[in-house]
Image (cartoon, coloured by chain):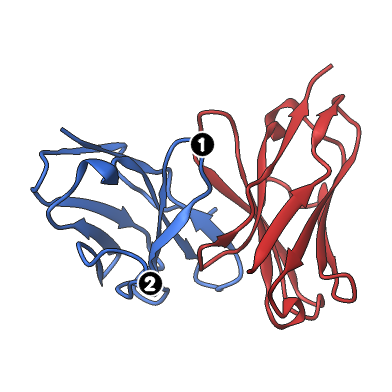
Amino acid sequence: SYALTQPPSVSVSPGQTARITCSGDALPKKWAYWFQQKSGQAPVLVIYEDNKRPSEIPERFSGSSSGTTATLTISGAQVEDEADYYCCSTDSSGYQYVFGDGTKVTVL
Amino acid sequence: QRRLVESGGGVVQPGRSLRLSCAASGVTFSSFGFHWVRQAPGKGLEWLARISSDGRNKTYADSVKGRFTISRDNSKNTMYLQMDSLRSEDTALYYCAKLTTSFWGRGTPVTVSS
């Protein structure tokens, strides 16, 4: 079955840039979505359709996609950005959704 | 204010069934497709199923196909997940969601244990 691959963890110092990648064979033709999940909370959408940011999400969050890799970038990471981040997309049919395994972002 | 509220979770023995509900408010429920997603303790998010706005089109993850059934009643603004032949690995927090948005419920826990 289709899978999205993310690194298990990313560490960054406050104010630095964190980049999280998500690889999948269908990404050249399918949108990527990014969710932030803090401990004990439901996921929150931070990027949709590869690079669009919901109005309530800080501008330091951005997304891009090239070929089979989508990337979430946190520019000037803050301590409050520590969380698990999941990419989400569909397989080539567009009917089956899948999440990546998640990336734990540590800001210290 | 729009809300999704899951219910129906609990402790169930392996092989038994459980039906989860997801009640929507503050939104035109019949206009949107919705999803079920679960998260096992300490694990990542797992997409389970999607149902179209009119209920006619349904898709499932391979891990639950044939055991779980998604449905909806637009007259009641409610979506369901019928879970049969439950296994210990189905133990998780189950969310309903308008997936590609931040419109998610808080989840209902399911524990499959003898």
Q: Is residue A97 left or right of residue B13?
A: left
Residue at the image point whose x is 84% and y is 67% from the top: B72
Locate residue A61 relative to residue A49 in the image: left or right.
left
On the picture, is B61 further left or further right than B66? Answer: left
- Looking at the picture, tell me which residue is in the foreground, A59 or B31: A59
**Disc 2 residue type (three-letter):** Pro
Chain A palette colour:
blue
The chain containing the residue under callout 1 comes to A
Q: CA distance from mark 1 to mark 2?
A: 22 Å
Furthest toward the front, the residue is B1
The residue sitting at 26% across, 59% down in the picture is A72
Residue A40 tag number: 1
Is the residue marked by circle 2 packed among few (<14), some (14-19), or many (20+) residues within 10 Å?
A: some
User: Residue B58: x, y in percent?
Assistant: 75, 69
Secondary element at image label 1: loop
Q: Residue at x 88, y 70 (%)?
A: B76
